[in-house]
Amino acid sequence: MLTMLEEALAQLDQVAALIKLEEGVHKRLRRAQRALIVSVPTRMDDGRVEVFEGYRVQHDNSFGPTKGGIRYHPDVNLDEVTALAMLMTWKCALMGLPYGGAKGGVRCTPTAMSQGELERMTRRFTSEIVLIIGPDLDIPAPDVYTNEQTMAWMMDTYSMQRGITVPGVVTGKPVLLGGSLGRRESTGRGVAFVTADAARELRIGLAGATVAVQGKGNVGGVAARLLHEAGCRVVGLSDSKGGIYNSKGLDISRVLRHLQEGGRFADLPDGDTITNAELLALPVDILIPAALEGAIHEGNADRIRAKLIVEGANGPTAAAADRILEGKGTRVVPDILANAGGVTVSYFEWVQDLQFYFWREEEINQRLKELMAAAFRRVWDYAAEQKVSMRLAAMSLAVKRVAEAHRVRGLYP
Ligand code: GLU
C-alpha cells in the first residue's frame, strides 16, 4: 500500500503529464516549501511529562498566506501532514481563494486526554510553531479531533505572546472571539451542496435518494442532517467503531443527539448495527466517506454499490480504488471540491476578522453556495470536455492555477 504522500505525488505526476506542467514548477510542487517538526512536552494530569511530536507543513505560498487545519490523532506523521498540506494547496487554488496550502498535527490520542491535558498540549504546540504562523503568514483551523475550543486556545496563546489580540491567526474560532457564523457547519453544508449538484447532473432525484455516511463528526454528521432535511433517505451512519443501518431511513437528528449525549450506536433501537466495511458496501445511491484517508482501497472498492461518492474526508479514496471505481462507472466528487466549504468559510472568517466587520449567517451561506456551485460547474464541465474523472479535472484546474502563479511570479532570486 502506498503512503498518503506517495498517493498525493502520484496524483500530481499524473496531472502534470496531462496538463504538460513545466518541469521546474513540477519539481517545486512535489516538495513542501517549509516544514517544522516540534516536540511538545506536556504535563499530564497524573504529574508525568509526556512528549508529543507535532508538525506544521507549508506546501506553497504563491497566492498568499498558507491555510489548513490542525489534526490530533495517533496516526499523525510528517508524511501524512505533508500530503494533506499539498491537498490544501489544490483545494484553495480550485476555489480561487488567496491562500496556499498548509497542515499541522500532533501525534497523540485525544480521546484519552482530559480537557486540561489537551489545553496544555495545544498551548505548547502553538508556542513551538508561533514563528511560522500569523494572519498574513499561515492560518490554522480545526481538523480531525480539534474544534472551536482548540482554536480559542491557539488564538489566546499567539495573542499573549504578541501582547495584542489577533483573531485572524486562526479560523474556526468560537463566534464570541471573532469566529464566523456558519463556519461550524460549513464543510458539511458544502458537501450537501455538491451532492445536490452532482445528483442533478446524474439524474438521481434527491428526494428519496438513499445515502450512507461514514463519519458522524463535524463533516459527516452535518452532511447527513442537511441531506436528510433535503429529502434524502439517510440509511447508514457510522463512526470509527461501526455504525447503524435502517433501509427505511434513519431519524438523523435523533441519532446525532443520542451520540452527542455519549450514547452508542448499539443502544439505538433505530436500526441494525453494522461494521464500517458493511457501511461502505450498502446498496445506496450516494456514499459519503467523511472520516479518514484511505477508507476506500483496492481491497474494498469493488464491493461499493453507490452510483455517486462524495468525499467529505481528505484523501478517502486510494488511487488503486479510484481506477476500480472508474471502471465500474461510479462517479466520485473529489475531496478538494467536495469538502472545500470549510476552508471557504474560513476565508470569510479571516476577511471578517481583518475588517472587524461581521456578516449575517444567511449572507455567509449564500456566498458559500455561490462559490461551491461555480467550482462544481468548472470541474464538471472540464471533466466532460477532457473526458477525465472529476478528480483529474479538479486537480488539473487547481495545479494549472498554481503553476501560472509560479510562472508569472518567476523564480527568486
Ligand atoms: N481542515 C479543513 C480542511 O481540510 C479546513 C481547513 C481550513 O479551514 O483552513 O479543509
Image (cartoon, helix red, strand yellow):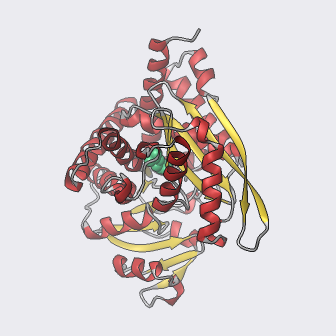
| Of 373 and 147, the residue lying toward us | 147
Work out which residue is located at the far right of the displayed protein and give it.
48
> Is 408 located above or below residue 219 in the figure?
above
Q: Position of residue 307 (x, y in %)?
A: 41, 57
> Is 119 located above or below residue 311 in the figure?
below
- Name the side, left or right, on which 165 lies relative to 194: right
Quadrant assignment, res 411: top right
Residue occupying image coordinates x 24% and y 45%: 367
Residue 132 seen in this snapshot: yes
Quadrant assignment, res 115: bottom right
Residue occupying image coordinates x 30% and y 70%: 228
Q: Position of residue 56 (x, y in %)?
A: 62, 42
Q: Position of residue 127 (x, y in %)?
A: 62, 46
Q: How many marks?
A: 0
> Is 368 located above or below residue 245 in the figure?
above
Q: Position of residue 303 (x, y in %)?
A: 55, 63
Residue 289 seen in this snapshot: no
> Is 259 located above or below residue 56 in the figure?
below
| Of 122 and 372, the residue lying toward us | 122
Quadrant assignment, res 195: bottom left
